[in-house]
Image (spheres, rainbow, N blue to C red):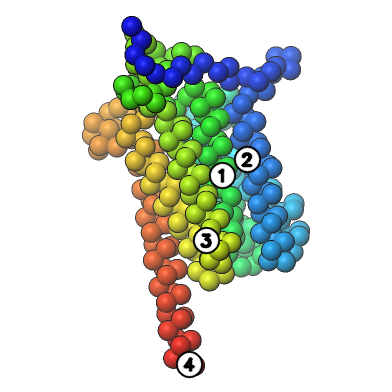
Amino acid sequence: MVLNAITWNIDPAIFSLGSHEIRWYGLLFGVGLVIFGPMIMEKIWKHEGLKSDWLYPKLFWYVMIGTVVGARLGHCLFYEPEYYLAHPMEILKTWEGGLASHGGTIGVILACWLYSRRVTHKSILWILDRLAVPVGLVAGMIRLGNLMNSEIFGHATDLPWAFRFPRSKEYWEAVPDGLLGCHPTQIYEALCYFAVFGICMWLYWRRDAANRYSGLIVGVFLIGIFLSRFVIEQVKIVQEVWEINMIASIGMNMGQLLSIPFVLIGVWLVVRALTIHRRETTLSANKS
């Protein structure tokens, strides 16, 4: 008898154009990256009266290229380096899947560094504080895309909100008899990322943190995104078989290991932002 669980049997393809499928993952990724993200950035630009060409086309293309290239290279080099270094042309086949959020984050940071040097001539934290505001929303939509693909889920569990993924080969490897569902870690992460998005929106619009606390918003973003990722990875099925040995030897998988530096950088940015603000407030009070 199949235990109580939600059976998730959604077709990952919305429709096909000839031999090419239009998939939910690509739609959610694209809508977040190309529509919702830029829409929020437009409101920020209008609110601050910034130069329009700083946003379009300059920032748009820097972030777009940094995200896609970084996410793809991150997957290839962090998770399957031997294969892709032996077959470098395969790296270009992004349509076959394989994107890593850690690589995407590194790609965006590098893109923002170049953007700051070549376009705004401001500190990199200036653009990162503003760009971090919508990214949690985009990241959450990407995780919902993973849900539509029946991928990146957790270990078997008898919790009442467990999901069965009959379309997934990984599901049948984890639960051969199909009696149990698995942790819907895509939903766990999406909810955490949406919460981070809400906090960053509050910091920007209600606390004026981008102007008052340099580095605070991006610091909170890094802590929220990657700490939640670190915790949720505990119940997630490993993406690569070799991660099993990694967990046995160091007690964490690659996703957790890669998350640690981002959390530490986030903590440093938050402490730095609050310390500088407190110092400036004290100096201002003494002068008056």
Compared across the picture, whether 50 is left or right of 236 comes to right
Number of numbered discs overlaid on the protein picture = 4
First in residue order: circle 1 vs circle 3: 1
User: Relative to 268, does residue 256 appear above or below in the rendering?
Assistant: above
- Distance from disc 1 to disc 4, alpha carbons, whole Å, reads 42 Å
Residue type highlighted by circle 4: Lys
The label number, if any, that marks residue 287 in the structure image: 4
First in residue order: circle 1 vs circle 4: 1
Residue tagged 2: 32
Residue type highlighted by circle 3: Leu
Q: Residues within 10 Å of mark 3 (few under 14, many from 20)?
A: some
Residue type highlighted by circle 2: Gly
Q: Residues within 10 Å of mark 1 (few under 14, many from 20)?
A: many
- Distance from disc 4 to disc 3, alpha carbons, whole Å, reads 28 Å
First in residue order: circle 3 vs circle 2: 2
First in residue order: circle 2 vs circle 4: 2
- Distance from disc 1 to disc 3, alpha carbons, whole Å, reads 15 Å
Q: Nearer the viewer, residue 172 or 60?
A: 172
Quadrant housing the N terminus: top left
Residue type highlighted by circle 1: Leu
Give percent across and percent down for residue 74.
49, 38
Residue tagged 1: 137
Give percent across and percent down for residue 101.
49, 40
Q: Residues within 10 Å of mark 2 (few under 14, many from 20)?
A: many
Splitting the image into 4 quarters, where does residue 268 fall?
bottom left
Residue 138 visible to an observer of this rendering: yes
Residue tagged 3: 203
